[in-house]
């Protein structure tokens, strides 16, 4: 009676190692026992696409019978009795994995091991293969030989509903589904979804080399995303829905289709022949995207290598298509609602910016990138009597359509108050009372500036809003201190609807920047960091006003998931003929403002530091304090302080303090016990030059200080 294979293995256990044979155990000449059917055992194996192998673990010799050679698609002359002969068929990655399976089985003391793996046939097509072998050990338990069966398994895997895939493959597929679900859960818009799928490495995460994604609308198939090289076929991006193309075919039939070769693709869809002639497509899956029983599009996963789509592959592809379909449907609804909301917001903003004399204006508005609703940010430019211009920036509390509606009403009211020619403090006071009378719980921050670009005078009033930024023609940036009050609406509720005005000056070629906090504030970040970033972006940005507005929007605001609206307004005074203006600031101090001198000194200190005035900065601040004190004490008006950097060599700082008195200053000789009369002596001692000039109804005292050069520091 013929001994079974297991019996032969058991008999071999504990025996000395047999002599290595150059032929398979089951295929040795002279040992073939004919079956009753007249077919030898090796031939029976070959009929079932099986063969045997015999691997000497000590010497490394590896024998295959003719059936085994057929499984590996090798000719006898291509096989030299070593595993190296299999390298043209078994990839290095698969070889490492098979070695790991054998080593693990030996280390764990198992008597057999088995594995599925892929080989590449002579014509390039992949073939699933299964090997199972018995590990033979000697009397001391040392393994010296493995013998077993190798067989084709492509049909088995393709027909099996439950694949015998490795734990590593199952883990990979689990990670793939988890990644896709997590990434798409954060995608709000259709653009966000396509960004996830087409990002670097996106197709590979889906198990493909490239992909094409399209949506169906009104009988038309629109491709909305494609990765190279499939994005280079513009003729196929917008086509009627029919069955001549694979994606529209999948959408029409609601059935997935799979192709395993370039020839099969062109045979089924000959219309593609002119477009994919030079594109390597060896296999592809075309999947309908169905959400709530409605076909919304189709997805193509393209591979540049041949691939047999097993049942597990197809189930995984359909699962991914379902996740993508749900995400696209949700994103489409988000885009529709957002379009309605942003349309409402846009209708409430100025449709055009009027031309202004002596200056240019650039404005930008962006709705938040998170949430379906827009907010209450706005801007406005108002022509005023006597050639002046009013500029407004504001933000109504909240991020919903109610905030946008309140913003629209408030903007129109404020524009009407400004158009009547009222000063900024009156405009904001009336706007606050108007908002309080709307009986809404919303408040608003706002800055209103009345600008006379002929002279450069700016009258600024601020209601809880960010201060403006000034940048001169030489790109020196500073944030002037601007007095302010409570936000509009709240100020009236608390009876504090008075807004003090601050006088600033815009030099020729200089720019005023107004913005809402959406440009400089991000959740979890300090707003001071945002203000510093804005300062740097303005300093390093382009010179043209529109280019600068785009630069600020792109650099600071247009980030994924920007949580707030953003309004931006830039006002530039045109440069005077004769070259760029010298860096200069002008600050006004009111007679009854007790904090005015300290605020002016702080601004002077900031500018001198920015101009790198060095040791002379302290002298300038001390002289400025003396001149401001004299102007406020000895006149009935306020003081206008100007600070200017004049190019050298050497560079000089010029300080001017102007008042409304016509009384000319005179030098005194105070005694030792006198408490006054030393002001001009101090000015003369600390400055390099000084003097007085008539200015209409008043006068100006000026003095100049030489800025030390680097060699003097």
Image: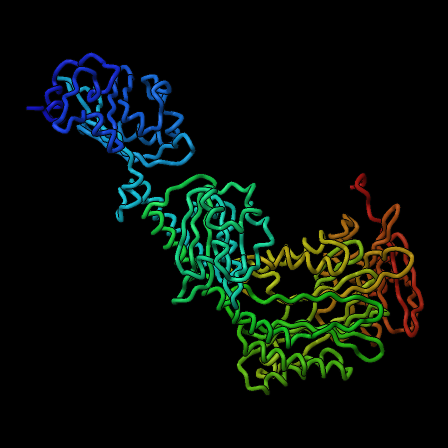
**Residue 506 place in picture, x, y as percent:** 80, 65
Q: Is residue 280 above or below residue 450?
A: above
Q: Is residue 599 left or right of residue 179?
A: right
Q: Nearer the viewer, residue 357 or 344?
A: 344
**Residue 291 place in picture, x, y as percent:** 41, 64
Q: Is residue 670 above or below residue 164?
A: below
Q: Is residue 583 left or right of residue 521?
A: right
Res 627 quadrant in image: bottom right
Residue sitting farthest toward the left: 1
Which residue is pictured at 70% across the width and 74% down the height? 351
Residue 348 in view (yes/no): yes
Residue sitting farthest toward the top: 19
Which residue is pictured at 91% across the width and 66% down the height? 665
Res 239 quadrant in image: bottom right
Q: Is residue 25 above or below residue 293?
A: above
Q: In the rendered view of the protein, which quadrant contains the C terminus?
A: top right
Q: Nearer the viewer, residue 594 or 466?
A: 466
Coloring applied to the structure: rainbow
**Residue 129 place in picture, x, y as percent:** 30, 34
Q: Nearer the viewer, residue 299 or 651?
A: 299
**Residue 637 place in picture, x, y as percent:** 82, 75
Q: Nearer the viewer, residue 446 or 16?
A: 16
Q: How many marks?
A: 0
Residue 632 in view (yes/no): no
Q: In the rendered view of the protein, which quadrant contains the N terminus?
A: top left
């Amino acid at each position: 009676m013929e001994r079974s294979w297991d019996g032969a293995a058991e008999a071999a256990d504990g025996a000395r190692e047999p002599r290595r044979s150059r032929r398979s155990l089951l295929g040795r000449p002279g040992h073939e026992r004919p079956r009753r059917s007249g077919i030898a055992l090796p031939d029976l194996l070959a009929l079932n696409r099986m063969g045997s192998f015999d691997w000497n673990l000590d010497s490394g010799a590896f024998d295959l019978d003719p059936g085994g050679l057929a499984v590996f698609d090798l000719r006898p002359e291509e096989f030299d009795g070593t595993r190296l002969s299999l390298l043209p068929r078994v990839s290095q990655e698969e070889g490492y994995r098979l070695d790991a399976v054998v080593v693990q089985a030996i280390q764990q003391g198992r008597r057999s091991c088995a594995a599925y793996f892929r080989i590449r046939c002579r014509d390039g097509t992949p073939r699933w293969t299964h090997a199972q072998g018995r590990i033979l050990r000697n009397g001391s338990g040392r393994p010296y030989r493995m013998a077993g069966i190798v067989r084709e398994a492509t049909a088995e895997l393709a027909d099996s509903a439950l694949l015998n895939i490795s734990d590593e493959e199952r883990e990979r597929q689990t990670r793939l589904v988890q990644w896709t679900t997590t990434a798409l859960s954060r995608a709000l818009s259709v653009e966000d979804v396509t960004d996830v799928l087409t990002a670097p490495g996106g197709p590979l995460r889906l198990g493909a080399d490239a992909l094409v994604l399209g949506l169906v609308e009104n009988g038309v198939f629109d491709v909305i995303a494609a990765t190279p090289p499939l994005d280079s076929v513009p003729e196929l991006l917008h086509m009627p829905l029919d069955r001549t193309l694979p994606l529209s075919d999948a959408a029409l039939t609601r059935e997935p289709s799979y192709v395993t070769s370039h020839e099969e693709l062109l045979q089924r869809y000959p219309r593609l022949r002119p477009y994919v002639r030079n594109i390597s497509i060896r296999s592809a899956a075309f999947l309908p995207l169905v959400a709530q029983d409605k076909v919304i599009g189709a997805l193509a996963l393209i591979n540049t290598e041949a691939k047999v789509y097993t049942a597990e592959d197809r189930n995984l592809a359909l699962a991914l298509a379902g996740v993508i379909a749900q995400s696209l449907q949700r994103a489409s609804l988000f885009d529709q609602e957002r379009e309605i909301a942003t349309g409402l917001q846009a209708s409430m903003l100025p449709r055009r910016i009027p031309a202004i004399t002596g200056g240019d204006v650039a404005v930008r508005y962006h709705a938040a990138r998170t949430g379906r609703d827009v907010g209450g940010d706005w801007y406005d430019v108002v022509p005023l009597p006597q050639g002046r211009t009013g500029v407004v920036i504001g933000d109504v509390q909240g991020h919903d359509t109610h905030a946008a509606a309140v913003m629209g009403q408030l903007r129109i009211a404020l524009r009407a108050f400004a158009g009547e020619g009222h000063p900024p403090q009156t405009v904001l006071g009336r706007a606050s009372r108007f908002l309080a009378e709307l009986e809404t719980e919303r408040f608003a921050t706002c800055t209103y500036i009345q600008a006379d670009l002929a002279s450069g005078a700016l009258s600024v009033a601020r209601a809880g809003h960010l201060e403006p930024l000034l940048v001169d023609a030489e790109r020196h940036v500073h944030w002037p201190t601007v007095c302010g009050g409570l936000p509009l609406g709240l100020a009236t509720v608390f009876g504090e609807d008075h807004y003090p005005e601050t006088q600033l000056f815009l030099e020729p070629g200089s720019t005023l920047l107004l913005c809402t906090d959406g440009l400089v504030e991000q959740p979890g970040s300090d707003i001071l960091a945002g203000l510093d970033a804005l300062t740097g972006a303005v300093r390093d940005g382009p010179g043209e006003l529109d280019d600068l507005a785009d630069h600020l929007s792109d650099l600071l605001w247009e980030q994924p998931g920007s949580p707030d609206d953003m309004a931006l307004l830039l006002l530039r005074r045109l440069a005077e003929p004769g070259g760029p203006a010298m860096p200069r600031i002008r600050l006004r101090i009111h007679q009854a403002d007790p904090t005015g001198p300290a605020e002016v000194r702080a601004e002077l200190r900031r500018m001198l530091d920015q101009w790198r005035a060095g040791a002379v900065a302290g002298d300038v601040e001390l002289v400025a304090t003396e001149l401001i004190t004299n102007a406020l004490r000895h006149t009935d008006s306020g003081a206008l302080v100007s600070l200017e950097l004049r190019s050298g060599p050497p560079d000089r700082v010029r300080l001017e303090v102007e008042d409304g008195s016509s009384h000319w200053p005179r030098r005194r000789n105070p005694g030792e016990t006198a408490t006054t009369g030393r002001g001009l002596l101090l000015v003369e001692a600390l400055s390099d030059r000084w003097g007085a000039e008539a200015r209409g109804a008043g006068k100006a005292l000026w003095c100049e200080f030489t800025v030390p050069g680097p060699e003097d520091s």
